[in-house]
Amino acid sequence: MVSEKKYPMTVSGKKKLEEELEFLKTVKRKEVVERIKVARSFGDLSENSEYDSAKEDQAFVEGKISTLESMIRNSVIITESELNTDEVQLGKTVTFKELPDGDEETYTIVGSAEANPIEGLISNDSPIAKGLIGRKKGDEVKIVTPGGEMSVVIVEIK
């Protein structure tokens, strides 16, 4: 039997997923069902673009619900007590500076389920996180990204 993928995440990340799941089940699912009912009332379903669109939305919503349920069921919560204080790892916020004279950037390394780079949350599966995990403050690190190689120095770990 194949074991399901584990999804490391913070308590707040799991809570966000649970809230999104609840919204999809209680609000979005009902909206889509109502759209399907209205579209059916238009008659011939073979040439009914509203019906087709609503059915596509229904498939998307149901797929998202299934994905979120799996992620929540297989979540592994990262707790502060498990974190090493001086090493970059999942759940830590790291500030680094691109060499030779780049700006400082700060990211929190989280599981893929709660990654959102715009909010400064990067996945532990991302090239930057993979390059930083296991390193310490002051370490100079070469990171290979899709955009090319970059060198950084770790400024702070919280």
Image (spheres, grey):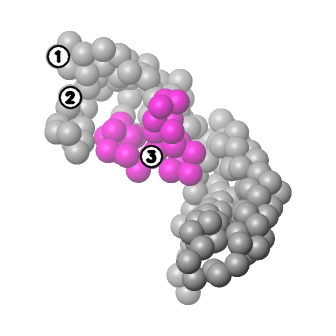
Question: Up-down: is 117 above or below 54?
Answer: above
Q: Residue at x 25, y 21 (%)?
A: 98
Res 52 → quadrant? bottom right
Checking the image for residue 151, the label placed there is 2
Q: Position of residue 67 (x, y in %)?
A: 61, 64
Mark 1 crowd level (few <14, some 14–19, many ≥20, 10 Å Cα): few
| Residue closer to the observer: 100 or 147 | 147
Res 97 → quadrant? top left
Tell me whether circle 2 and circle 1 mark residues in contact (CB < 8 Å).
yes
Q: Which residue is mark 3?
A: 124
Q: Which residue is mark 1?
A: 100
**Circle 2 — which element?**
strand
Mark 3 or mark 2: which comes first in sequence?
A: 3
The reply to whether residue 1 is visible in this rendering is yes
Disc 3 and disc 1: Cα gap in Å? Answer: 25 Å
Disc 2 and disc 1: Cα gap in Å? Answer: 8 Å
**Circle 1 — which element?**
loop
State the extent of the magenta-drawn residues as a range: 108-133
Residue kind at label 2, given as amino acid type: Ser
